[in-house]
Image (cartoon, rainbow, N blue to C red):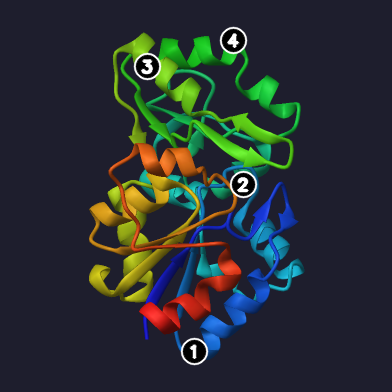
């Protein structure tokens, strides 16, 4: 039986609309004895809310099986003074972190969402404040560095553009806390007590999910939903071990190829 890391956004839903067959696939994977961990770069809701949303789609999981980037940030930045440019909903996840508006030891950039709050979080004044803190010696962290994500209206600009802008302005390199960072994947493997070579990563992002997991020695499956673009796959040297139409096909594919 395999350990399986499952991306969430773009694999199980797009703009909170379920992708058909996800709940049934999870039930069958569990029945087949596979160990599952849900690994997401979503930065707009706390873990409990994300888990409840998945359960509302019929997907069987406990909160502890869902690994999120805000929780990773709380662990990495515990005890430090942090200027956080993140959605308000996830502030409660930063347990042990001192959130400040100035004199920060670190600047943390979260992800964008589909609401007007994004305009407030990533305003010029907030980005200029972050730049000032970086110039004064603060370190730059980001929950992820995604360029865009898929919504039901089409591709939408993500906060990776703001991260790169701050890197350029302050001549500094951000530390990525979510996928495809080493720490994030290692935490997932440790939670499942899994060997990388015996673990599958299933996702829709050829860069963060597939290339990131392959660098850690994992086997990979790309789904043709969410961020999947045929031209992006053709343009890269990254080759997943399998490409399937959607999460619904995963149990059958693993039975045949796993």
Quadrant of the image containing the N terminus: bottom left
How far is mark 1 from mark 3, CA to CA? 49 Å
**Can you tell which of label 4 and label 3 is closer to the viewer?**
4
Tag 3 or tag 2, which sits nearer the N-term? 2
The label shown at residue 32 is 1
Percent x, y of residue 179: 40, 48
Disc 4 crowd rating (10 Å Cα; few below 14, some 14-19, many 20+) is: few
Q: Quadrant of residue 28?
A: bottom right
The earlier-in-sequence mark between 1 and 4 is 1
Q: Disc 4 vs disc 2: which is toward the camera? A: 4
Which numbered dot is residue 92? 2
Foreground tag (1 vs 4): 1
Q: Name above or below for residue 130 compared with residue 247.
A: above
The reply to whether residue 153 is visible in this rendering is yes
**Residue name at image x 60 percent, y 71 percent:** 248
Give the mark toward the camera: 1 or 3: 1
Say whether disc 4 or disc 2 marks the residue closer to the N-terminus: 2
**Helix, strand or loop at mark 2:** helix
Residue at image coords 37%, 16%: 134
Residue 68 position within the rendered picture, expressed as x and y whole percent measured from the top left: 51, 54
Circle 4 is placed at which residue position? 124
Left or right of 115? Residue 83 is left
Could you tell me which residue is drawn at 33 percent across and 63 percent down? 241
Q: Nearer the viewer, mark 2 or mark 1?
A: 1
Residue 137 image offset from top left, x and y in percent: 31, 17
Crowd band around label 1 with a 10 angstrom C-alpha radius: few (<14), some (14–19), many (20+): few
Q: Quadrant of residue 62?
A: bottom right
Give the spatial CA distance, label 4 vs label 2: 25 Å
Q: Secondary structure at mark 1?
A: loop
Residue designated by label 3: 134
How many angstroms separate mark 2 from mark 1 (CA)?
Answer: 36 Å
């Amino acid at each position: 039986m395999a350990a399986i890391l499952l991306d969430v956004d773009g694999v199980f839903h797009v703009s909170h609309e379920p992708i058909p067959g996800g709940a049934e696939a999870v039930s069958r994977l569990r029945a087949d004895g596979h160990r599952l961990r849900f690994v997401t770069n979503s930065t707009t809701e706390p873990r409990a809310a994300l888990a409840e949303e998945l359960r509302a789609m019929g997907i069987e999981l406990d909160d502890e099986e869902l690994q999120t980037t805000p929780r990773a940030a709380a662990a990495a930045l515990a005890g430090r003074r942090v200027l956080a440019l993140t959605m308000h909903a996830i502030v409660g996840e930063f347990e042990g972190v001192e959130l400040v508006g100035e004199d920060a030891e670190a600047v943390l950039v979260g992800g964008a969402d589909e609401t007007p709050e994004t305009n407030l979080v990533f305003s010029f004044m907030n980005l200029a404040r972050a730049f000032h803190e970086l110039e004064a010696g603060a370190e730059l962290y980001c929950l992820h560095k995604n360029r865009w994500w898929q919504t039901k209206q089409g591709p939408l600009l993500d906060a990776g553009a703001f991260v790169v802008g701050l890197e350029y302005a302050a001549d500094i390199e951000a530390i990525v806390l979510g996928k495809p960072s080493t720490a994030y994947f290692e935490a997932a493997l440790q939670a499942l007590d899994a060997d990388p070579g015996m673990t599958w990563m299933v996702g829709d992002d050829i860069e963060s999910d597939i290339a990131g997991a392959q660098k850690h020695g994992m086997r990979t499956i790309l789904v043709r939903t969410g961020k999947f673009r045929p031209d992006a796959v053709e343009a890269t040297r990254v080759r997943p071990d399998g490409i399937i139409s959607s999460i619904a096909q995963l149990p059958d594919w693993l039975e045949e190829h796993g």
